[in-house]
Image (tube, coloured by chain):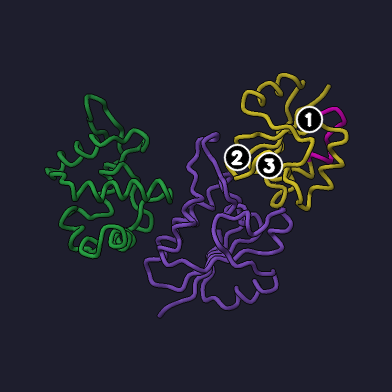
Amino acid sequence: MIKKCLYVNRRAPYGTSYALEAIDVVLIGSAFDQDISLLFIDDGVFQLKSDQDTTGIEMKNFSSAYSAFEMYDVEKLYVSKEAMTARGLKKRDLVVDVEVLSDNAIKDLMDEHDVIFSF
Amino acid sequence: MSIEVNGKILETDKEGYLTDLSLWEPMVAEAMAKADKQELTSEHWEVINFLREFYAEFAMAPAVRILTRAIGKKLGKEKGNARYLYNLFPYGPGKQACRYAGLPKPSGCM
Amino acid sequence: MSILHTVNKSPFEKNNLESCLRYVKSGSAVLLIEDGIYAALKNTCFEKEMATAMKEVNFYCLAPDMKARGFSESKIMDGIKMVDYAGFVDLTIEYDKVQAWL
């Protein structure tokens, strides 16, 4: 049976390893033919900021991986409007195309899914 | 573990992948293939170069099913199938070719 | 005695910045590093609080951490100075001691 899986990302990249681990789990999970959605709330929206350049901190820049999600049939990316506003971010600041949802709509999004993975 | 290339010793992980990806050069692929008793033809290099370009663009090594589809788009349908790629890389196109290309183990690969 | 305070956590997630601003004295400095750099951005919900603190305290921001997270100098609040790693070292010498808000 196909389950609707929601991956919830709420941490900034680089300061902790949550964001990178989420990418690995999503890509592995995509092999199981499930219905996958990704949600970015709180500091998770910072993961999608364009123009990341990690040469100065000598860490791997994994932000281009989000552009590869489509090839893995991971096409549903959602971000919180309120999280973006609080952080001074606009949709055009992001590295991939996303759907911007209000926190109220996100409550329903969480309800609609069978399984929620948190990062 | 390590591999010797042109008199230099390069460190690898326990599965034989380069630990420092920036040290890759074509001779690394040749040396790894030789250790596997595998000859590298232009068809092999086509896949290896494709993987390196993919990694440069997306910062990850593709899983086999993604590689197959992407190769089909780029190099033609007759090459974008598992049989063709497994013939070239019998240990698995994802794992073996990525190793030769100096990439880490594919993401989304078990 | 003046202190260099460092903040390395996102203000949206942890209260390190708020604690730091509560205890920082006029004439001291705050250096934002790692996820702490998000406090330096324009148009965030912390902009007002930061602007008030900047009247009495020198603010710095570590450039490699800004760039890694996708922000250039034009995206940070006026009055916050960018420093590189060498500048970080200079600051630790310029101030009498360092208080790290971890």
Left or right position of A81 against C45: left
Chain letter, colour yellow: C
x then y, percent, for residue B65 = 31, 63
Q: Is residue A106 left or right of residue C95?
A: left
Does C78 appear above or below B50?
above
Which residue is labeled 1 in the image?
C29
- The answer for which chain carries disc 1 is C
**Residue bearing the label numbered 3:** C36
Q: Tag 1: Cα neighbours inside 10 Å, few (<14), some, or many (≥20)?
A: many
Q: Please state the horizontal and vertical placement of residue A111, each as a whole percent of the image.
A: 60, 77
Q: Give me the C-alpha separation between circle 2 and circle 1.
A: 22 Å
Q: Report the span colored magenta.
A: C20-29
Q: Is residue A111 magenta?
A: no
Chain painted in purple in the figure:
A
Residue C67, numbered label: 2
Element on which disc 2 rests: helix
- Write the residue at 23% across / 40% down: B29
